[in-house]
Amino acid sequence: MPLLNLKNQALALISQTVSGQELAQLRIAFLGRKGQLNQVFKKLDKVNYGRQFNETKQAIESALTERQTQLTGTTAEWFDLTAPGQLPPLGHLHPISQAIAEIQRIFEHLGFTRVRYPEVDWDHYVFEALNMPADHPARDEWETIFIDAPAHPKLGQMVLTTHTSNGQVREMERVKKPPIRMLNLGKCYRRQQDPTHTIMFHQFEGLVVDKGISIPHLKGTLDYFGRQWFGPKIKSRIRPFHFQFTEPSFEVDMACVFCDQKGCRVCKNAGWLEMGGAGMVNQFVFESAGYVRNEWQGFAFGFGIDRLAMLKYHINDIRLLTGGDMRFLKQF
Ligand code: DAH
């Protein structure tokens, strides 16, 4: 049955076309003046097969038109496998996630490597190894949440990390032989809740260990970060303070981004905003990690990410960051 074979062949080929160009070629091949249908027609017994011939022609024609509409209904006539894909809408990056990516980028430029250490850790790494024994009054400031589980004979109880400083001794133990340029970034927990404090918050911890490290290296690093985060004009200063795990210790201030140091409610007329703590690594901490006393020098710093993000994006209530309101989140 040449007509039936022809029809089936034509319909199969038409259904497999992926472009208008291919369709046009098939139209010529089957329905054109010198096309296959006319070739068959020449040899055909016109009396008996005239009607079937017309039906075949019509079937092929309507298949061509139908496929044409299908193809033009899709966006691309020609499918380029190598073209980059279109990203499906996946929501919106949270401002804290954006801040974390940006902080990582800034410190990577200075040669820091981002690491992650436990956010539920032993007392030893969070406090003891950092020169904060259980009965020391300085430790009260950390308002710790303890895990109700048996204590480890050497490492003590498990706590929700109150700061990312637990990464310091963990990193020193891992590296064993400096240099170290660590950026430990993670979640921290303290018993606190008000418009500027939440039980869970984020910190990053910088740690540099090498030979001949001194305060100017620390100040240069902090200045670089400040300029990258707040813009090239930002002023920063370090001010003497006390931390058990650094000697000397500092608090790090940056010029108030709200009033340009004229004095306002946010900076309580000081013109400066407190950003975090820093200092030169206490030799006690090196010894905790098994290093020889006075063989290495280093500096460390710890900043609150939620606070940095609030100041940069002018967010006045920390609870907005965990409220999950899309109208708020979409602004960043
Ligand atoms: N861990 C301190 C806090 O949470 C911040 C801090 C102070 C980190 C001094 C440091 C440092 O690395 O050297 O308040």
Image (cartoon, rainbow, N blue to C red):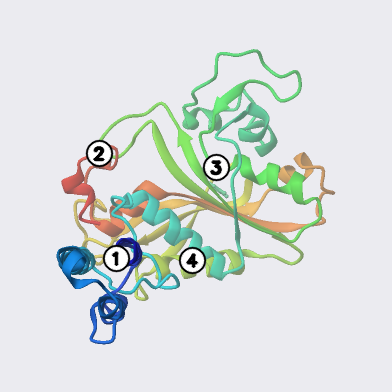
Disc with the residue nearer the chain's start (4 vs 2): 4
Ligand 1: does it lie within 8 Å of the C-beta at label 3? yes
Disc with the residue nearer the chain's start (4 vs 3): 4
The answer to whether residue 267 is above or below residue 202 is below
Disc with the residue nearer the chain's start (2 vs 3): 3
Instruction: State the CA–CA distance, disc 2 to disc 1.
Output: 66 Å
Judge depth for marks 4 and 2 and give the one in front: 2
Q: How many marks?
A: 4
Instruction: State the CA–CA distance, disc 1 to disc 3.
Output: 80 Å
Ligand 1: does it lie within 8 Å of the C-beta at label 2? no
Give the class, few, some or many, for how many residues have Cα within 10 Å of label 3's Cα (few <14, many ≥20). Answer: many
Disc with the residue nearer the chain's start (2 vs 1): 1
Q: Amino acid at mark 2?
A: Gly
On the image, numbered disc 2 is attached to which residue? 324
Give the class, few, some or many, for how many residues have Cα within 10 Å of label 2's Cα (few <14, many ≥20). Answer: few
Disc with the residue nearer the chain's start (4 vs 1): 1
On the image, numbered disc 1 is attached to which residue? 3
Judge depth for marks 4 and 1 and give the one in front: 1
Determine contact: label 1, label 3, CB under 8 Å: no
Q: Residue at x 61, y 23 (%)?
A: 158
Element at label 4: helix
Judge depth for marks 2 and 1 and give the one in front: 1
Residue 267 at x, y = what percent?
A: 26, 53
Foreground residue, 243 or 222?
222
